[in-house]
Amino acid sequence: MPDFIIGEHENITGIEKQAPDRVTDNKERNQYRELDNVIQEYTKKPGQLIGILHRAQEIFGYLPEEVQAYIANKTGIPVSEVNGVVTFYSLFSTEPKGKYEIKVCLGTACYVKGAQEIMNTLKENLKIDEGETTQDKLFTLQSTRCIGSCGLAPVLLANDDVYGEIAAKDVMNIIRDYQKGDKIES
């Protein structure tokens, strides 16, 4: 079987960007093959791009410029349009995220009950700022606005797990359990 080859693509951000000419890593090769299957599945559907991008993000974990360019090339959609959709919707990420996305609700109810102190504790202990990922790629720290759990304020999300009525002094216990691979049942 010939090497998996990815072609050239148009300019994304003012600097000529290309997907890699040759993908030599088996994992990456399999990811691109899976993406090819997704693109074939969605090609005949109207409004295909959002669905393709969702699935591509599931496959790669994020949407780097190379993946955006590849999608543009395979679908015939201008790369500027692909990039415009990716950067418009906050649910898409152009940066790798940690295994656990930690989101602190900073909506009004959570904020007045100490959510900012929780955020500060996480920043200090994880040694990252909001929007960043730890060096070990375990945690990405983000803030969010009201998640509809105001009765549990303040609220922290770890991926899809909701932790309510937490205090800044207790938040690192939750983090330590994720570091050990033990998930606290909320």
Image: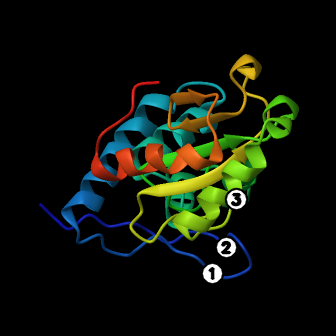
Question: Quick one: SS at disc 1?
Answer: loop
Asked if the residue at tag 2 contacts the one at tag 1, i.e. Cβ–Cβ closer than 8 Å, the answer is: yes
Dot label at residue 120: 3
Mark pair 1, 2: CA separation:
5 Å
Closer to the eye: label 1 or 3: 3
Residue topped by disc 1: 16
Residue type at mark 1 is: Glu
Give whichever of 12, 165 is nearer the camera.
165
In the displayed structure image, the side of residue 173 where residue 181 appears, left or right: left
Q: Position of residue 45 (x, y in %)?
A: 57, 24
Question: Quick one: SS at disc 3?
Answer: helix
Q: Residues within 10 Å of mark 3 (few under 14, many from 20)?
A: some
Decide: is 151 above or below 4: above
Residue displayed at 37% across by 75% down: 21
Residue displayed at 50% across by 61% down: 96
Dot label at residue 11: 2
Residue type at mark 2 is: Asn
Give whichever of 157, 119 is nearer the camera.
119
Mark pair 1, 3: CA separation:
39 Å
Closer to the eye: label 2 or 3: 3
In the displayed structure image, the side of residue 51 where residue 105 appears, left or right: right
